[in-house]
Amino acid sequence: MPIITLTSDLGTQDFYLAAIKGTLLSNFNDINIIDITHQIPSFDIFKAAETLRHSFKFFPKGSIHCVLVNNQSHLKAPILLGKYQGHYFLGPDNGLFSFLFDEAPEVLLTPHENKTITKRTFPFMDVYLPALLALINEKPTESIGEITTEFVEKSPFRSFGNANIANGYIWHIDKFGNCLSNINKELFDSVGKGQAFLIDIKGHEAETIIAHYDEKQSGQMIVFFNYLGLLEVAISNGSAAQLLGLNRNDRVTIRFGKKD
């Protein structure tokens, strides 16, 4: 059964999502539609990319991931179809793909549009749907669209390390107030090399990394690497965002070595 995931900034209060799902169910006899999220902040392609890049690997290869964020008009930002690590991605060429992938996709093309439909402000029917039909029906690549190697590139702030310092920032705050950074365990180990460290998040400091939420008493700040391998800041039985005053894009700095 083909898997189609949806990531959007459409929310659930309007009829847009219902129209998309109804269209899919009307055109495919046997598909599995999965909502990743529809609560992406309006027009926030970076948050959409970070959300999808940390979730698509949990799906079977061959899954098709549709991103509908900031693509109200596909005249200025055409829709692209990319194949990356065995998955397919449909989304607007508005910088999304440069945030989503760490390297160039295996295949990238501009899907053919449904010429019988007048261009609209919502491109799902005339671009996404024909591409989905072609993919699921295993049509050859040349029948889906024109091969390209170019996409709009923007420069996201990636985590990085130099000398004895690793830098990153908070990219996501979940419903519990836990704050996820973009510093991963690989960067931590490669820069730190087993040295002592001091983690600074907006003036709040930590010198230890724990393994589980319950290793400290309620109300205490905890820092750990989560199941994604990303450094996370939390408050045991509380909201780190609220109690520590943390927000998306706040800087996270780790200094390694002996203290001054």
Image (cartoon, rainbow, N blue to C red):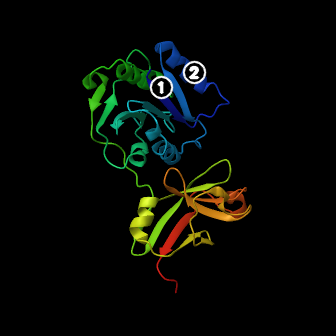
Q: Mark 2 points at which residue?
A: 19
Q: Name the residue under label 1.
A: 124
Q: Which of marks 2 and 1 is nearer the N terminus?
A: 2
User: In the picture provided, is 204 more to the left or to the right than 166?
Assistant: right
Q: What residue type is labelled 2?
A: Ala
- Which mark identifies residue 140? none
Q: Is residue 145 visible?
A: yes
The 10 Å Cα crowd at callout 2, few under 14, some 14 to 19, many 20 or more, is few
Residue for point 63% across, 24% down: 15
- Residues tagged 2 and 1 counted as in contact (Cβ below 8 A): yes
Image x and y of residue 46, in percent: 49, 48
Residue for point 51% across, 44% down: 51
Image x and y of residue 167, in percent: 47, 67
Of 233 and 102, which appears nearest the observer?
233
The 10 Å Cα crowd at callout 1, few under 14, some 14 to 19, many 20 or more, is many
| Number of numbered discs on residues | 2
Q: How far, Cα to Cα, is label 2 from label 1? A: 10 Å
Residue for point 44% across, 40% down: 57
**From the image, which quarter does the N terminus lie in?**
top left
User: In the picture provided, is 222 more to the left or to the right than 132?
Assistant: right
Q: Mark 2 falls on what kind of element?
A: helix
- Is 58 placed above or below 172 here? above
Q: Spot the residue most to the bottom.
A: 260
Q: Is residue 160 visible?
A: no
User: In the picture provided, is 246 more to the left or to the right than 6?
Assistant: right
Image x and y of residue 166, in percent: 45, 68
Q: Mark 1 falls on what kind of element?
A: helix
Q: What residue type is labelled 1?
A: Phe
